[in-house]
């Protein structure tokens, strides 16, 4: 992990090192510090000191330790425990193999899995909010598979892609999720194990990454599904969930997004955008670009 100063944001630093000047300010681009500078600096030092060299080499980026520290409200010991678990998960789950499935030397089996999982367009990253955070769209009624592990690989691919797109576009840390529940029926609800697994990945392994989750067109029957899973949603994540109904939902979107760039089911003013093309998105579009990005 690198801890950067306000004027060193664009300088490359070796993973696991702290700047020599102990008076430097820890910062995440576009994010307000949740703790005092001293607490964050000392906490990050404690976390990095607790990692072995292999763990340090597997940090996803220079701010991973800081995000875990903030997620645990400054409790460095708990952050160390959670971070070590996340690093082990990334290794065992094969996050790098998932991310690189469509690179020149990508794993062919993983590529086949991702191609099948994505063929209906149930998940994709497209566009940004006004501040440059990528938008990860989910459309549950287009679910086409039943194998949980591969569905989770699909989730991780898109989380990683949304993060990469946001970083390239604006240098920010977080991304948005927009879920379209149009046509959702109770039989479309995923098994409880899948819902819990999804929440575990987002909350435990990607803390401080979600900006907002917008829920569009939730039918009355969705309340039954929500009542089943909300007990597993941590309080911080609950605060980020926005249920978008009618005009109030459109106002919420218009405040945060250029409405000419979002899908029509969110109130987009451009009508239907170009139809999603899974093959183009996976195989031809750079990983750090959203679909149909100019």
Image (cartoon, rainbow, N blue to C red):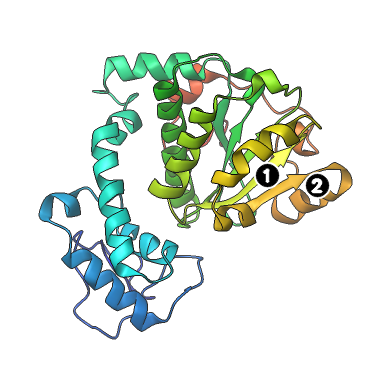
- Res 157 quadrant in image: top left
Q: Is residue 41 visible?
A: yes
Q: Of marks 1 and 2, which one's residue comes earlier in the chain?
A: 1
**In the rendered view, would you say 82 is above or below 11?**
above
**In the rendered view, would you say 185 is above or below 84?**
above
- Left or right of residue 123: residue 256: right
Extreme-left residue of the structure: 53
Residue 148: percent from left, percent from top = 44, 22
**Residue at (44%, 38%) from the top-left corner?**
161
Mark linked to residue 214:
1
| Image quadrant occupied by the N terminus | bottom left
**Residue at (22%, 47%) from the top-left corner?**
58
- Left or right of residue 122: residue 165: left
Q: Do tag 1 and tag 2 residues touch (Cβ < 8 Å)? A: yes
**Count of numbered badges drawn on the protein:** 2
**Residue at (57%, 53%) from the top-left corner?**
237
Q: Helix, strand or loop at disc 1?
A: strand
**In the rendered view, would you say 136 is above or below 86?**
above
Mark linked to residue 249:
2
Q: Is residue 25 visible?
A: no
Between residue 57 and residue 261, name the one nearer to us.
57
């Amino acid at each position: 992990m690198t801890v950067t100063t306000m004027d060193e944001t664009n300088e490359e630093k070796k993973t696991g090192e702290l700047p020599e000047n102990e008076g430097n300010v820890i910062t995440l681009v576009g994010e307000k510090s949740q703790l005092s500078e001293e607490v964050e600096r000392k906490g990050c030092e404690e976390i990095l000191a607790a990692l072995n060299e292999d763990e340090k080499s597997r940090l996803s980026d220079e701010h991973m330790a800081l995000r875990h520290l903030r997620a645990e409200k400054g409790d460095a010991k708990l952050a160390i425990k959670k971070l070590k678990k996340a690093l082990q998960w990334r290794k065992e789950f094969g996050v790098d193999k998932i991310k690189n499935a469509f690179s020149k030397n990508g794993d062919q089996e993983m590529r086949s899995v991702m191609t099948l999982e994505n063929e209906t367009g149930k998940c994709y990253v497209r566009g940004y909010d006004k501040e440059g955070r990528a938008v990860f769209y989910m459309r549950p009624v287009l679910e086409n598979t039943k194998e949980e592990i591969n569905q989770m690989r699909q989730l991780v691919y898109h989380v990683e892609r949304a993060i990469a797109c946001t970083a390239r576009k604006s240098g920010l840390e977080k991304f948005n999720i927009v879920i379209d529940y149009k046509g959702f029926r109770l039989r479309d609800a995923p098994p409880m194990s899948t819902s819990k697994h999804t929440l575990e990945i987002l909350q435990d392994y990607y803390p401080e990454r979600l900006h907002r989750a917008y829920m569009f067109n939730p039918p009355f029957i969705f309340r039954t599904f929500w009542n089943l899973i909300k007990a597993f949603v941590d309080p911080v994540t609950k605060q980020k969930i926005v249920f978008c109904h009618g005009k109030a939902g459109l106002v919420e979107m218009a405040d945060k997004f250029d409405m000419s760039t979002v899908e029509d089911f969110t109130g987009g003013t451009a009508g239907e955008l170009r139809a999603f093309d899974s093959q183009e998105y996976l195989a031809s579009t750079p990983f750090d670009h959203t679909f149909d990005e100019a």
